[in-house]
Amino acid sequence: MVIVNADGKIVVVNAQTEILFGYSRQELIGQPVEILIPARLERLHVKHRASFLAEPHVRPMGAGQELLGKRKNGTEFSVEISLSPLRTPQGLFVTSAVRDITERKHAEEQIKKLNAELGEALRRAERLGATGELATNMAREIENVLDTLARLLSQLERHPGADPDTKELVGKAQEEVTDIRRITGNTLALQREHDSWKRG
């Protein structure tokens, strides 16, 4: 959590913020909040901050945009930020809840990549009019992609930093994996029955 005043100066940070950004509390208090974002985004952030102060209300920051934080060592990481106005006798302050979503972004990219591979395998099967042995081979290829995707989802679900949004994403992806497994499983079962009938 970071609290800034109307001038954009940091007045309060919690221990999690110190860990997340690599600064001590003493290093942050009194600094402009832009110290926590990449330099190339500072001007844009100042405009967004002014816009929020003009109409302060609880909302996520930069809805639909990729937000980045910057650590003391200069490394950048994906963040999710929720803003809340805090009205006091001393004036208006802004409370920012900052979450590191690097793991979630990485998982989303991996899932997107695996989904693309899965889609390509399905399209190849469709183009080739897959039947018989070809259908079996394609089903097994798809099963291999699903195995990789299932392992990734399981690791992500058990990750100690997994937040509710990440777990919801994992749950939906696992449902899709189950549905596709059912289809490929039926294909393999039908082929086994066909092979058994031919041998008989």
Image: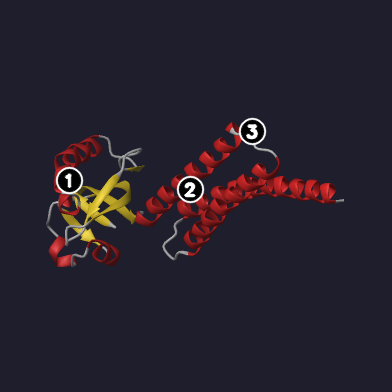
Q: Which mark is residue 114?
A: 2
- Residue for point 61% across, 45% down: 138
Classify the position of the N terminus by image quarter.
bottom left
The image position of residue 86, as x and y in percent, is 28, 49
Q: Which residue is mark 3?
A: 129
Q: Is residue 44 left or right of residue 183?
A: left
Label pair 3/1, CB-CB below 8 angstroms: no
Above or below for 123 versus 74: above
160 or 196: which is nearer to us?
196
Number of callouts in the render?
3
Q: Which mark is residue 6?
A: 1
Count neighbours of disc 1 (C-alpha within 10 A) and say few if under 14, some if 14 to 19, many if 20 or more. Answer: few
Q: Using the numbered discs, state the Cα–Cα distance from disc 3 to disc 1 in whole angstroms.
A: 65 Å
Q: Amino acid at mark 3?
A: Gly
- Amino acid identity at mark 1: Ala
| Secondary structure state at the residue bearing disc 3 | loop
